[in-house]
Image (cartoon, coloured by chain):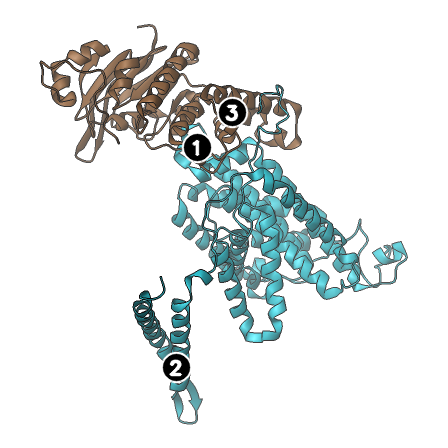
C-alpha cells in the first residue's frame, strides 16, 4: 500500500493542505491581519501581514504532516463496540471509587495540604457535586439541560437572602435552598419538558440567561450587579470559626483548645462539601435502582416505548429535573457560604457549559467519570497558570484530545441497575 | 358477544385531506387472536396508533371492557391506555437497547413497582415491602425469560440479542405490563420460517395460558392463517372483509385487493410475506 500509491497520496495531501491554508488565510486576514490602534490623528489601521503569512504557513505544514502521517501510526480510536461483560470491569471501578473516597477524606490531613490545596479541592468537590446533579438530568434521564447554572444561582441567592433577611444559619437554609431550586426546576420543567432534544436545550439555555439577567436587574432584591455581601459562614454546632468570639460564645478553636488558624475553617468547609457530595452520590446510586430511576433511563433510551409501558413521561422527567435542580441548590448554598459574596458574574453560561463538559467528558451516567473529569477540568487550568493567556488554549486542546481518544467519555460503562446474577431474590438456583 | 374485549365503532382518522382509516368497526375478543391484514398503506398501523393513543382519532369510539368498568380509550392519553391494559409492540423493534434484558422486563412493571416503592420514598428508605415487590417483579421477569430461553442472557444488553430474540423479548416486555389486550405490530417481520413457527407457538401459548386478547397486524400469511381466530381485511382504510381464516381465504374481494391470486388458483398456506 506504499509504493505506487505514494504519489497520489502526496498529491491529495498537498491539495488538502492547500485548502486548509486558504481557509486559514480567509480567517486570519481580518482577525490577525488588521489591527486598529489609537493614534493622535484618530483610529488608524495597522497591518500585520507577516503574522498572517506565518499562521497560514503553520496551518499548511500542520495539515500536510497530518495527511502524510503513516496510517499505522494513527491514534487508536475506541470506536469498537463497548464491552457488555460488565462483571470483569466491575471490581476495579468499585475499588477506584473507594480509593477516591479515602483520599478525599484524608486529603486535609496530608502534610502538603496547605490553604491552596484545600481550597482547590473544595472547588473540585463543588463541581463534582454539580456534575453528579446534572448527571441525573443529562446522563440518566437524557434531557439536555444547558441552563443548569440557573438552579445553582437560585440555591446561592436563596441561601444568601434567607440568611441575611431572616438570619437563619447555614444548616437551616440548606434544605430550604434545595427546595427552592427544586421548585424552580418544576416550574421551568412543566411547560418545557414536552419539548425534545435540541428544543429543550435552547429553552433551558434561555432560562439560564433569564435567571442571570433578572438577578442583575432586580437591584432592590438581589443587589443587582454588585451582588450580595456578608453572607454568614457556617458554624460548627453554633461555634464560629473566628479569631475572637462574640460575647457569650466560644469559637471552634477555643472549644478544642487549638491555636487559631484560618485553615481550620477551610478544612471544615471542605468536609461539608465532601459530605454533601457523598450524599448526592449515595442518593443517585440508590434512586437509579428504584423504578423511577429505571424509568428515567427507559425514557432516555426510547420515549415512545416507555409510554407504551404506561410510564408517564412528563411526571418522570419532572422528578429528574427537580432532583437535579435540588442538588444544584445545595451546591449553590454551599458556594454562597464559602465565598461570603455572590454576584450574577458567578452564574454565567460558561459555568453551565463547564458542568455539562464534566458530565460528557466523564462518560454520561458514570459517577466515577464525573469525579475524574471534574478534577481534570478544575486542576488542569490551575497547573496551566504559568502559561498565562495560553492556559485556556491548553485546556481546549486537552478536551479535544479526550474526545478524540475516548469519544464516549473517560469512563463510559453502564452498570446495570439490577442483575439476575447475584440477585438476592426469593427463589434462587435458576442461574447457570 | 359477552366476551368482547375491545369494541371499535366508526373509527375514522384523517390527516389533512388523506383519510387513513375510514369508518372502521370491529370487535376483538378475550382469549382470541384477531388479525388485521391489508396491503402496505392500508391503514393498519394507523388503527394501532389510534387504539394505543399515539394518535387521537378524528371520529369514532374505542371501548375497552375493563374489569373496573368500560373505558373509552379515544379520550385517554397514551400512557394511561397502557395502564388500562392495552400493551403494544412496534413494527421496528423498540427495546431499550442499552439496558439489560432483565431491566427491560422490570421497567415494564413500572406502575406496580412505583406504588410498592410508595412513589420512591419507601424505596429510598429500603422498606421490606418494596424489596419483596422487587423480588416478585424479578421472578415474573424470570418466568418470561425461561419461556423465551433467554434466562442465561438476562444480564446482557438487550441491543446485543439476535433479531428473533429481540422480537420475542419485546412481546414478553409487553406481557410484563399484565395487559388485557396485546397489540402486536408485525411480530413476524424479518423472522425466518423456523423463527415464525416458534413465534406462532409462543402467541398461541399466551392466548391459551394468560386468557388475554391478541390483536395482530401481520403480512406473513403463515402466521395470520395459522393462528388467527378472526381476520379483518383493510384496503384504503376501509374494512373490505371480516371473518374466520377460511372465509377470508376464499373471499373474492380480499383476493383481488390483497392476495393478488387468480380467483380459481388454490391459495397456498404460505404466501410470500412482504417485508416491511
Closest to the camera, between mark 2 and mark 3, is 3
Q: Residue at x 42, y 21 (%)?
A: B84
Q: Residue A13: percent from the left, percent from the top?
A: 34, 69
Which chain hosts label 2? Answer: A
Mark positioned earlier in the residue sequence (3 or 1): 3
Find disc 1 in the rendering and name its residue.
B161
* Viewer-nearest residue: A409 or A370: A409
| Same-chain check, marks 2 and 3 | no
* Viewer-nearest residue: A20 or A215: A20
Q: Quadrant of the N terminus of chain B?
A: top left
Visual hue assigned to chain B: brown
How many neighbours does mark 3 have within 10 angstroms: few (below 14), some (14-19), or many (20 or more)? many
Find disc 2 in the rendering and name its residue.
A52
How many neighbours does mark 1 have within 10 angstroms: few (below 14), some (14-19), or many (20 or more)? some
**Label 3, label 1: how far apart the Cα atoms are:** 12 Å
Secondary structure under tag 3 reads: helix
Colour cyan maps to chain: A
Find disc 3 in the rendering and name its residue.
B151
Amino acid at each position: 500500500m506504499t509504493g505506487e500509491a505514494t504519489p497520489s497520496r502526496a498529491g491529495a495531501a498537498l491539495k488538502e493542505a492547500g485548502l486548509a491554508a486558504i481557509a486559514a488565510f480567509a480567517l486570519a486576514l481580518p482577525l490577525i491581519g488588521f489591527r486598529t490602534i489609537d493614534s493622535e490623528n484618530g483610529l488608524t489601521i495597522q497591518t500585520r501581514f507577516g503574522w498572517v503569512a506565518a499562521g497560514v504557513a503553520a496551518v499548511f505544514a500542520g495539515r500536510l504532516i497530518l495527511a502524510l502521517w503513516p496510517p499505522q501510526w494513527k491514534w487508536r480510536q475506541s470506536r469498537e463496540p463497548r464491552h457488555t461483560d460488565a462483571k470483569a470491569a466491575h471490581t476495579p471501578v468499585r475499588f477506584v471509587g473507594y480509593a477516591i473516597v479515602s483520599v478525599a477524606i484524608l486529603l486535609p490531613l496530608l502534610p502538603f495540604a496547605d490553604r491552596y490545596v484545600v481550597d482547590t479541592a473544595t472547588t473540585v468537590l463543588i463541581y463534582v457535586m454539580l456534575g453528579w446533579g446534572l448527571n441525573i438530568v443529562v446522563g440518566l434521564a437524557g434531557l439536555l439541560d444547558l441552563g443548569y447554572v440557573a438552579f445553582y444561582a437560585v440555591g446561592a441567592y436563596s441561601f444568601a437572602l434567607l440568611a441575611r433577611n431572616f438570619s437563619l444559619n447555614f444548616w437551616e437554609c440548606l434544605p430550604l435552598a434545595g427546595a427552592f431550586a427544586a421548585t424552580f426546576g418544576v416550574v421551568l420543567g412543566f411547560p418545557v419538558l414536552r419539548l425534545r432534544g435540541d428544543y429543550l436545550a435552547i429553552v433551558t439555555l434561555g432560562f439560564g440567561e433569564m435567571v442571570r439577567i433578572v438577578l442583575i436587574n432586580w437591584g432592590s432584591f438581589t443587589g443587582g450587579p454588585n451582588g450580595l455581601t456578608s453572607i454568614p459562614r457556617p458554624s460548627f454546632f453554633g461555634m464560629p470559626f473566628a479569631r475572637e468570639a462574640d460575647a457569650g460564645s466560644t469559637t471552634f478553636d477555643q472549644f478544642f483548645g487549638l491555636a487559631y488558624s484560618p485553615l481550620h475553617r477551610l478544612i471544615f468547609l471542605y468536609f461539608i462539601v465532601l459530605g454533601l457530595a457523598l450524599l448526592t452520590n449515595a442518593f443517585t446510586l440508590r434512586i437509579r435502582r428504584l423504578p423511577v430511576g429505571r424509568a428515567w433511563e427507559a425514557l432516555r433510551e426510547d420515549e415512545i416505548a416507555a409510554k407504551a409501558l404506561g410510564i408517564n413521561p412528563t411526571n418522570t422527567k419532572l422528578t429528574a429535573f427537580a432532583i437535579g435542580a435540588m442538588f444544584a441548590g445545595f451546591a449553590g448554598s454551599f458556594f454562597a457560604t464559602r465565598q461570603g459574596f455572590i454576584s450574577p458574574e458567578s452564574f454565567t453560561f460558561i459555568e453551565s457549559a463547564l458542568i455539562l463538559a464534566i458530565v460528557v467528558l466523564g462518560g454520561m451516567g458514570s459517577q466515577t467519570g464525573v469525579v475524574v473529569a471534574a478534577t481534570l477540568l478544575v486542576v488542569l487550568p490551575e497547573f496551566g497558570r504559568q502559561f498565562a493567556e495560553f492556559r485556556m488554549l491548553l485546556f481546549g486542546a486537552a478536551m479535544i484530545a479526550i474526545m478524540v481518544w475516548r469519544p464516549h467519555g473517560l469512563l463510559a460503562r453502564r452498570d446495570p441497575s439490577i442483575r439476575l446474577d447475584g440477585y438476592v431474590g426469593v427463589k434462587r438456583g435458576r442461574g447457570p | 358477544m359477552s366476551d368482547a374485549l375491545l369494541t371499535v365503532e366508526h373509527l375514522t382518522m384523517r390527516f389533512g385531506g388523506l383519510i387513513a382509516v375510514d369508518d372502521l368497526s370491529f370487535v376483538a375478543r378475550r382469549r382470541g387472536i384477531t388479525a388485521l391484514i391489508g396491503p402496505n398503506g392500508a391503514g393498519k398501523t394507523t388503527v394501532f396508533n389510534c387504539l394505543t393513543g399515539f394518535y387521537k382519532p378524528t371520529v369514532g369510539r374505542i371501548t375497552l371492557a375493563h374489569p373496573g368498568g368500560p373505558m373509552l380509550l379515544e379520550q385517554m392519553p397514551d400512557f394511561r391506555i397502557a395502564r388500562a391494559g392495552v400493551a403494544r409492540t412496534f413494527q421496528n423493534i423498540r427495546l431499550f437497547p442499552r439496558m439489560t434484558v432483565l431491566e427491560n422486563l422490570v421497567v415494564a412493571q413500572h406502575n406496580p413497582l412505583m406504588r410498592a416503592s410508595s412513589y420512591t420514598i419507601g424505596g429510598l428508605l429500603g422498606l421490606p415491602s418494596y424489596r419483596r415487590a422487587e423480588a416478585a417483579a424479578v421472578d415474573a421477569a424470570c418466568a418470561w425469560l425461561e419461556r423465551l430461553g433467554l434466562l442465561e442472557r438476562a444480564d446482557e444488553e438487550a441491543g446485543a440479542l439476535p433479531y428473533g430474540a429481540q422480537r420475542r423479548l419485546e412481546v414478553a416486555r409487553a406481557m410484563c405490563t399484565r395487559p388485557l389486550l396485546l397489540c402486536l405490530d408485525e411480530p413476524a417481520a424479518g423472522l425466518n420460517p423456523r423463527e415464525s413457527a416458534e413465534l406462532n407457538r409462543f402467541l398461541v401459548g399466551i392466548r391459551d395460558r394468560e386468557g388475554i386478547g391478541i390483536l395482530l397486524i401481520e403480512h406473513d400469511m403463515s402466521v395470520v392463517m395459522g393462528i388467527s381466530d378472526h381476520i379483518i381485511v383493510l384496503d384504503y382504510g376501509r374494512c373490505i372483509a371480516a371473518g374466520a381464516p377460511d372465509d377470508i381465504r376464499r373471499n373474492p374481494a380480499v383476493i383481488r385487493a390483497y392476495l393478488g391470486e387468480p380467483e380459481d388458483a388454490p391459495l397456498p398456506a404460505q404466501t410470500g410475506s412482504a417485508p416491511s
